[in-house]
């Protein structure tokens, strides 16, 4: 019944099988608001490449964790 109504459900099943929770860190809110979301926006609008986005996110997260 689900497959008939939602043809994409089978593909989503794989996603849920390998899903992992967010890392537990007191810095997550700050990282998400100040690093992840803005960089993700730049990548999705093609202002930067995915590779540049990964580097920018990693650098930003390290900076936050160092204080």
Image (cartoon, rainbow, N blue to C red):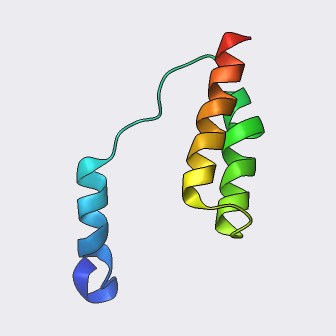
Q: Is residue 28 visible?
A: no
Image: 2 above or below 37:
below
Relative to residue 44, is residue 54 drawn left or right? Answer: left
| Residue 3 image-quadrant placement | bottom left
The x, y position of residue 27, in whole percent, is 65, 20
Q: State the residue at coordinates (71%, 21%).
A: 64
Q: State the residue at coordinates (69%, 31%).
A: 60
Image: 34 above or below 1:
above
Of 55 and 65, the residue lying toward us: 55
The x, y position of residue 42, in whole percent, is 73, 59
Split into 4 quadrants, where in the image is the C terminus? top right
Q: State the residue at coordinates (30%, 58%).
A: 15
The x, y position of residue 35, in whole percent, is 71, 39
Q: Is residue 25 visible?
A: yes
Of 7 and 65, the residue lying toward us: 65
Split into 4 quadrants, where in the image is the N terminus? bottom left
Image: 25 above or below 17:
above
């Amino acid at each position: 019944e689900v497959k008939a109504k939602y043809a994409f459900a089978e593909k989503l099943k794989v996603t849920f099988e390998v899903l992992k929770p967010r890392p537990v860190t007191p810095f997550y809110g700050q990282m998400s608001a100040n690093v992840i979301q803005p960089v993700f926006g730049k990548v999705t609008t093609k202002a930067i490449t995915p590779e540049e986005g990964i580097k920018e996110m990693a650098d930003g997260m390290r900076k936050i964790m160092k204080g």
